[in-house]
Image: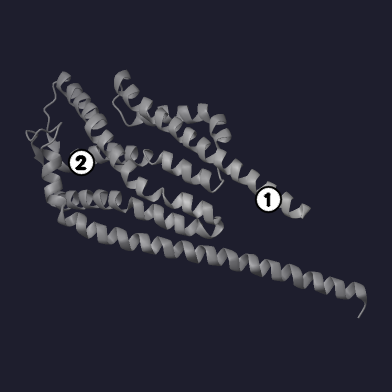
Amino acid sequence: MSMESHAKRLGSATSKLVSEQGLMSLVEHLTELRRRLIYVLIVLFIALVGGLVIAKPTFQFLLHQRPANGTLELHTFSFWDGIGIYMQIAFVSALIVTIPFIVYQLWLFVKPALHPHEQRSTLKYVPFALILALLGLSFAYFVVFPLAFDFTRSVSQNLGLQETFGVVQYFQFMFGIILPITVLFEMPLLIMFLTAIRIVNPIRLKKMRRLAYFIMSVIGVCITPPDFISDILVIIPLIVLYEISVWMSNTIYKKQLMKDAEWEEQYKAAEQQ
């Protein structure tokens, strides 16, 4: 066998091995991702069972808070409305409780690609997921939802319409406001996590500031009544959240640069020895 033929066969075998290793790595990552998703679904199901248990007291609590104040008469237009409300309240409650576990599973998924100090720094973000979710939930329910509710009722009254509220429509309207804002309040945590694993940095976030402001404005306009005051009351907190995210990203990024500089100095010192 000639040297040229042998080299071709060796090169072909090497490329095949690299291809198989890449495929195995992709399969392993997909398998790990599926495992994490299964864990999340199991915990979400358990939380859903608990949500069904507390669905009735949660319903009574939400109904007797502002803006309803216990005086709003709700109607059912289908035999399944009661079951639908139970399931909606249970699912939203379960989702909020499961958020920290989802963040933890995300951390476990990316953990093998992180250095030990990055693993420690990102793990401490997990408890803050629930805190931010509760802050977003409170802001949405006690500030944004009453604004939207009062505005829509005032429009109906000005048009002389007879108000008849369906219980499903009422809670769909409520959750349609609460859920997006609750998720958006996780933005600082997400930005910090992505910065810690070196996917984003404050330089890139500052360059995207105009686009981010535009997106925040669109979201604020979409989830609030079409009046200037309500839009501003939602858009400003969202922009503040983005700026907090940039500031936190900048803090983490500076620590990363300092750590990289220390490693470079240690590497140079080891080479000189």
The one of 149 and 159 positioned closer to us in this rendering: 149
Asked if one can make out residue 132 in the rendered structure from this viewpoint, the answer is yes
Distance of mark 2 from mark 1, alpha carbons? 59 Å
Q: Report whether 259 appears left or right of 3.
A: left
Q: Is residue 264 above or below residue 40?
A: above
- Where residue 78 appears, as percent x and y from the top left, is 14, 48
Among the two numbered marks 2 and 1 on one chain, the one whose residue lies closer to the N terminus:
2
- Where residue 7 appears, as percent x and y from the top left, is 86, 72
- Where residue 65 appears, as percent x and y from the top left, is 13, 35
Q: In which quarter of the image is residue 259?
A: top right
x 16%, y 18%: residue: 158
Dot 2, crowdedness within 10 Å: few (<14), some or many (≥20)?
A: some
Q: Check disc 2 and report the residue beneath it.
A: 171
x 23%, y 41%: residue: 172
Q: Check disc 1 and report the residue beneath it.
A: 266
Residue type at tag 1: Gln
Coloration mode: one colour
The one of 113 and 20 positioned closer to us in this rendering: 113
x 48%, y 64%: residue: 32
Q: In which quarter of the image is residue 222?
A: top left
